[in-house]
Amino acid sequence: VGRADTGTGTLFCLVIDELTGEPALLSNWHVLMGPTGRSGDPIIQPGNSDGGRMWFDRIATVERSILSAAGDASIASLTGARRWLPVLATEHVELDETTEVALGEVLRKHGRTTDTTEGVVDGIGSYRVAYNVTPTRQENRWIDGFKLVPKNPANPADLEISMAGDSGSCWYNPRKKSAVGLHFAGEGDPLPGSEFALACHM
């Protein structure tokens, strides 16, 4: 999913908006809002990078967003143009709850670019990420959340657990069927042992 005028990210999952009681989609601020966005803007699926077209693929309208220590998140109300199912893609998993993250926990996500990947939580804290907050200004923001690394920290197979386009993915515990975090960043280091992903708390 994404805006018609920017790149493409991942739909975390479909949620129920507590303010309206209606289904909505959840992703990142930098996927659905970004430096030029505002409430009421249209969201398309597939996103612009994957050939989405405003006049044919509009599925939602941006409602609310945050970019703060609490997270990088945005919610958009569905237009009713598409039918939907209350499950995550690929595995058709229906999440039953949200849970707090735990060190050493193995989580899974489905991203637009890397598809299905797993990671181990090896850090919980506040992480600094550079954001384009206006079209001409970039700022560092501290986001509370957690860090995931490959199951084998040396990463001899050079696995990519996140890449550009995966932003907005749901990190979840497949055993508990619980949503744990909202993916918002990763690294671009070519060294296999430097691989990591960042998620904010659900």
Image (cartoon, helix red, strand yellow):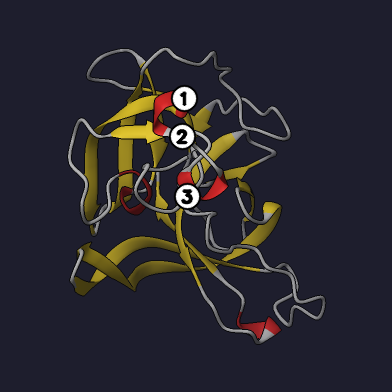
16 left or right, relative to 122 = left
Q: Residue at position x 32%, y 61% from top?
A: 144
* Image position of 34 with respect to 54: above or below: below
Disc 3 or 1, which lies upstream in sequence? Answer: 3
Q: Residue at position x 33%, y 54% from top?
A: 30
* Image position of 20 with respect to 27: above or below: above
- Depth order, front residue of 53/154: 53
- Amino acid residing under circle 2: Arg
Spot occupied by residue 55 in the image (x, y as percentages of width and height): 40, 26
* Circle 3 crowding by C-alpha within 10 Å: few under 14, some 14–19, many from 20: many
Q: Residue at position x 63%, y 84% from top?
A: 190
In what element is the residue under mark 2?
loop
- Amino acid residing under circle 3: Thr
* Distance between the alpha carbons at the discs numbered 2 and 1: 5 Å
Mark 1 and mark 2 in contact (Cβ < 8 Å)? yes
Q: Residue at position x 34%, y 48% from top?
A: 5
* Circle 2 crowding by C-alpha within 10 Å: few under 14, some 14–19, many from 20: some
In this view, which residue lies farthest toward the right? 157
* Image position of 195 with respect to 135: above or below: below
* Image position of 41 with respect to 167: above or below: above
Please identify the quadrant where the C terminus is shown. Answer: top left
Spot occupied by residue 61 in the image (x, y as percentages of width and height): 30, 28
- Amino acid residing under circle 1: Phe
* Distance between the alpha carbons at the discs numbered 2 and 3: 12 Å
Find residue 90 and report its image quarter: top right
Task: Look at mark 3 in the image and give the residue it sits on.
Answer: 8
Spot occupied by residue 6 in the image (x, y as percentages of width and height): 37, 52
- Residue 56's disc is 1
Task: Look at mark 2 in the image and give the residue it sits on.
Answer: 53
